[in-house]
Amino acid sequence: MRKHLEIFPVTGLPEVAAGADLAALIADGTDLRDGDVVAVTSKIVSKAEGRLTYGTRQEAIDAELVRVVAQRGETRIVQTRHGLVMAAAGTDTSNTAPGTVLLLPVDPDESARVLRTALNERYDVNVGIVVTDTLGRPWRNGQTDLAIGAAGVRVIEDLRGTTDSHGNVLAVTEPALADEIASAGELVKGKADGVPVAVLRGLQDAVLPVGEHGPGARALVRDAEFDMFSLGTREAARAAVLSRKEPSGPREVDPAVWAGLLRDVDDVRLELGDNAVTVFGVEPVTVGVIAEKLAVLLHAEGYGVTVRPGPGAEATVTFGSRSR
Amino acid sequence: MRKHLEIFPVTGLPEVAAGADLAALIADGTDLRDGDVVAVTSKIVSKAEGRLTYGTRQEAIDAELVRVVAQRGETRIVQTRHGLVMAAAGTDTSNTAPGTVLLLPVDPDESARVLRTALNERYDVNVGIVVTDTLGRPWRNGQTDLAIGAAGVRVIEDLRGTTDSHGNVLAVTEPALADEIASAGELVKGKADGVPVAVLRGLQDAVLPVGEHGPGARALVRDAEFDMFSLGTREAARAAVLSRKEPSGPREVDPAVWAGLLRDVDDVRLELGDNAVTVFGVEPVTVGVIAEKLAVLLHAEGYGVTVRPGPGAEATVTFGSRSR
């Protein structure tokens, strides 16, 4: 158990320019001790690293994204090269000159490692580093600060397999420690105040020995393949007709997938094979409609799928290669 | 700017039973001061309120949910009566007797108000209360503690319209303060240690005057209608064929919705009307397939939609009433 946590803002930092020595600025601005965790806003890391680009924000977002996760109007939630899913790819136009856009650090974990190493080698202090940014969340209003980079700090506390005070095994509990550190730091930082650094004292147990940087904040990024929300609601429906995979190889399918679909349709019959379902009917347009509905439902379950019109009122939906 | 934040665990609390006096337990276990924020794990609130039910966890989840947001295997992400989107509807079987399941408080904001009022009236202290629970997140590994109930504390800092240190207007910045408080408190609480309460000192500016409870954590819940992730990827695709709304009234539609769809299809022609698009073709099964694809794409854009086979190789897709 942690006994007592203190969080200090690091005040009085000058405006950070490209090439700035962040380690010196932070070490001069506070009295760092072994075991402290330093939460640094990514914005000043980016500025120090000269991550300013010329052009419009939309151009910058286009260059930073690897895929669009969801879009409504002008708002684009995208996945960045870092794997982060966030609005506007983390680009920033506040506190920047007109016509310029600030990008996220190229590798925020590496930025954290460089800063940690500099603080250790030049100021003889062993601290953990968390590079933070502000992210919105599905289902919740407002934003919280999360960890986009980390070094020398445990990012996830794996409590799986440990027991609670009653001896029950804690099955799925993995607190995202680095994210909670980022949120806690934000309570004393503050966007409008120009305090981009906070120091958390009392988390010694979460700070790694000198030389060990740990897995970084990358470990907090869930692979889209394992995510139940890899696309927005609208984008998932669009993908179901526009971005289907080709089937490959026979795979079993549970007819429960389309149970209920045929409730209101007369004169349509399905025949299920190893890796295909054939739709027979009287009215061929309806056969096409039902075949396409089956294809969407199979896609939703992760199957590759194609629809092929047969002779007359018949269509074959071929499926295979469950992918998620 | 906040100068300095301290977070203490409240230790030595006894096991909480139904009917327990939480205000007394917390006030006895710590030296509360005006302006403190008390972060209380929902689990002990539920226990004090006797929110234990008999049966299986699945039965409890079924009773607590208002809709299933996403499901993979046994894992169900659901929306609860409170509006919260979370795994297993917040039900808990750790630290409970076999055959029993602990549910979330009926109204965590009300629980927070009752606790705040009791601490004020009986111990003469004005503190903010945040009731916390542990929630998973899309796109990120691990869980963080968030606010599911709150009283006497600002839950969102609305910085929209304020300026940064350079005079730029902060357009979309609304820090979810109560969520960041919950995450910060978790850093000294801890699931395995049996420390269910933390006190945060230094957030006086976020604590409301006596008698004002504020909007509660309910203000942090985003309405599904305004959420780009109101369903899981799989569920969104399923809903696109199984849960479409009926169209009502003419509405304009941008043919860009289906641009690209007809690239690989020969002999199909579309005719766009006020609130319908008619598909003409040579091969009627293909006409049905295309009509259904159009319907899914229109559904994705928020239109109510129906597909009606026409005479011969023709189908009409009627749309209207854009809903989101």
Image (cartoon, coloured by chain):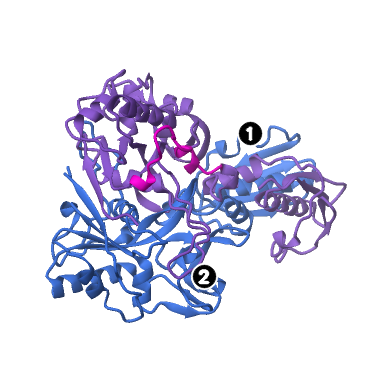
Chain colours: A blue, B purple
Q: How crowded is mark 1: few (under 14 residues within 10 Å), some or many (20 or more)?
A: few
Q: Which residue is drawn at 38% across and 20% down?
A: B55
- Which of pointers 2 and 1 indicates the residue nearer the eye? 2
Q: Which of these two is toward me, A125 or A247?
A: A125
Q: Position of residue A256 (x, y in %)?
A: 56, 36
Residue B279: % across, % down = 81, 55
Q: Crowding near pointer 2: few (<14 within 10 Å), some, many (20+)? A: many
Whether B213 is among the magenta residues is yes
Residue tagged 2: A61
Q: Nearer the viewer, residue A142 or A317?
A: A142
Q: Can residue B93 be seen in this view?
A: no
Left or right of B297 on screen, residue A235? left
Tell me the CA gap for discs 2 and 1. Answer: 42 Å
Residue at 26% of width from left, 28% of height from top? B95
Q: Main secondary structure of the magenta part?
A: loop
The quadrant the N terminus of chain A occupies is: top left
Of B52 and A290, nearer the camera is: B52
Amino acid type for the residue under numbered disc 2:
Ile
Residue B260: give its label: none
The residue where tag 1 is placed is A260
Q: Give the range drawn in magenta.
A: B204-223
Instruction: Confirm whether residue A153 shows in the render.
Output: yes
Q: Quadrant of residue A213?
A: bottom left
Mark 2 residue element: helix
Question: What amino acid is labelled 1 in the image?
Answer: Gly
**How many labels, in total?**
2
